[in-house]
Image (cartoon, helix red, strand yellow):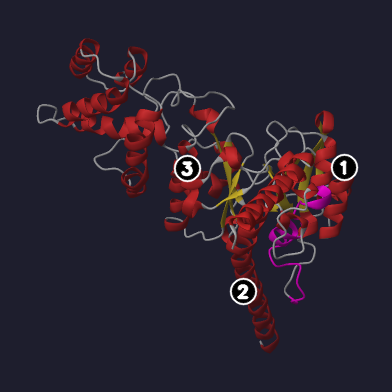
Amino acid sequence: MPREEVENGRDDMLIDGNEVEQRRLENAVPEGFNADYLKAYYGKIFPYADIFKWLSYGNDGKHPGCDHSYFGRREFSFTLDNDIYLRFQSFNTASELENAIKEKCPFKIDIGPVYSVDPSKRHAYSQGGDNVFTPVEKELVFDIDISDYDDARYCCSGADVCLECWPLMTIAIKVIDTSLRDDFGFSHILWVYSGRRGVHCWVCDGKARRLNNEQRAAIVDYFRVYKGNENSSKKVSLVGPALHPFLVRSYTEVLKDYFEKRLLSSQNLFLNEERFEKILEMIPDESVTSELRGRWLSNKRSREEINVARWDQLKNLLQSNKQKGQGLRRCIEEIVFTFTYPRLDMEVSKHMNHLLKAPFCVHPKTGRVCVPINPKNCEEFDPSAVPTLSQLLGELNTGGFKGEGDSEWDGTSLGDCVRYFRESFLQHLLKSCKEEIETSYNAKVQQSRNSISW
């Protein structure tokens, strides 16, 4: 091919690329969060059918064992503009849910329990005198907020989060998810980014949904290690001759490596006197703390190596033959647990009637969508890369990416998130639910036959 044609070909390709970029810029939507953006999101992208399928747990089918009142007894709450709060909303079908959300355009959607009766008609039942309005099912949920780690991180505080402190949420997912599966035998677990500063966990197995408040509290207590006085410098106390196997597994498989390879340096835990004094306060031996303090105040090192060097000195001294007390050697684990172990909002998990924000909501402060997180590769999750409301609307304006499906979300950067929800979580859950419905129905039929033959 003559050189002139080659050059012209390259020019044409460049022009085409510029046109695509120009079209993207022309259709870009200004960053932000408002009712108009939200209306477009609810009108074009929100995955109503998937949410309905999930919360129906197979009861939307034609099997004679299905409870067709199930979804209609689920409580939803809407937080509207100007903080108008609507509780005890209920819907019988996916279209009813969709129409209500499109009409009211809630800034936030929360999901509550399944009640014994339709929550929107609770007053009619209460007039009868019997307390028939009561929660009968609710997913076991966990709420983990990075603002609860403010005494364990120095890069951010409050609602702020960055890639230096987000590994704290990765640790929480790995520790809790493994325990829920291996220690409690749960299978259908959904992790969701809260949209701003934390993660939510939904345990959706039938046996989890039917736990009463006392059983939920027992599971929460299983995860509790922060049992000390909150005003004390020592918030974690690992007592006993040996750690519980769950704590050993968490420490050896997750906490120790993340502390030493990530957080120790990224948070500069030993950078200055103020920071290392907070750690020395966790060691109940004045001779040890005095020796370490003397070394660190007299020996100035470069910022890059100071954290690792001081941590190694602390470990070596506590583990040396001179320090034979079990309590002192246990201080190493207690320090690691203090800075890394999951900090749960206990009250959220204990009570069936507690509501939690729905997946695929949009956080009004960040404009980011509450997307699912795959626990198998949660270390790759980047909260700053989560799709924003304005980004999604801009993609719609340019025609999206046009995936294989015919849904609007399939043509946006939210597509992979919905596909993960559907293929990796929902399909397996519904298969299990249908098997459970079939088994329960057959047992009832057999029981009926037995009673008749008797």
Q: Amino acid at mark 2?
A: Glu
- N-term mark: 3 or 2: 3
Q: Amino acid at mark 3?
A: Thr
Extreme bottom residue here? 453
Pointer 2 residue: 435
Image spot of residue 309 (x, y percent): 24, 26
Q: Which mark is residue 440?
A: none
At mark 2, the secondary structure is: helix
- N-term mark: 2 or 1: 1
Q: CA distance from mark 3 to mark 2?
A: 33 Å
In the rendered structure, the answer to whether residue 394 lies left or right of residue 310 reads right
Task: Say how many tags the image has.
Answer: 3
Q: Which mark is residue 170?
A: 3
Q: Which mark is residue 104?
A: 1
Q: Is residue 340 visible?
A: yes
Quadrant occupied by the C terminus:
bottom right
Q: Which residues are the magenta region?
A: 42-64
In the rendered structure, the answer to whether residue 148 lies left or right of residue 408 reads left
Image spot of residue 238 (x, y percent): 32, 35
Q: Is disc 1 in contact with disc 3, using a CB cutoff of under 8 Å?
A: no
Q: Is residue 265 above or below residue 13?
A: above
Q: CA distance from mark 2 to mark 1?
A: 36 Å
Q: Amino acid at mark 1?
A: Lys
Residue at x-position 26% and y-position 21%: 284
At mark 1, the secondary structure is: helix
Residue 47 in magenta?
A: yes
